[in-house]
Amino acid sequence: MATRVGSKSIFGCLTLLQTWIYEYFPLFCPSQILQAPDAPRASSWVCHRFAGGDDARQRLVQYRQMLDEMSGEDVSWTPYG
C-alpha cells in the first residue's frame, strides 16, 4: 500500500526494507563502508537523511523513473553469492 500514489506514510521495519533494497537493487545503493565482521549488515551503508519539500518530490520522480527504466540486469538476483 505504501507504493501507491495516494499514500502519505509507511510503517514497519524500514531498516530491513532499506537493506533488502540495497542488496537486490545496487542502482539505489549508497556508498558502502568497511565494517567489523560481527556488525549488523544494515550498518554497511552510509545513508543520508533528506528533508522534505521540493527536493523530496524531485527525488521521488527520479526514483520512479529509475525503477521504470530498470531491466533484469539491474537486479542482483543472488546478492549473497
Image (cartoon, grey):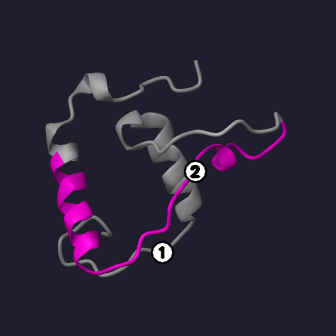
Residue marked by disc 2: 46
Instruction: Give the answer, above or below, for where 20 lies relative to 56.
Output: above
Q: Nearer the viewer, residue 64 or 35?
A: 35
At x 48% / y 74%, what residue is drawn?
Answer: 11
Circle 2: element type: loop
Q: Which residues are magenta?
A: 38-65
70 magenta-colored: no
At x 22% / y 45%, what residue is drawn?
Answer: 67
At x 68% / y 49%, what residue is drawn?
Answer: 43
Residue 2: horizontal and vertical position, in percent?
Answer: 32, 69
Residue 53: horizontal and vertical position, in percent?
Answer: 27, 81
At x 75% / y 39%, what residue is drawn?
Answer: 35
- Left or right: residue 40 versus residue 1 is right
Instruction: Give the answer, above or below, for where 61 lies relative to 32.
Output: below
- Amino acid type, mark 1: Phe
Q: Could you say which disc has been placed on residue 11 in the image?
A: 1
For the N terminus, give its image quadrant. Answer: bottom left
- Amino acid type, mark 2: Val
Circle 1: element type: loop
- Left or right: residue 31 versus residue 55 is right
- Residue at the outermost top position: 81
Q: Number of labelled discs?
A: 2
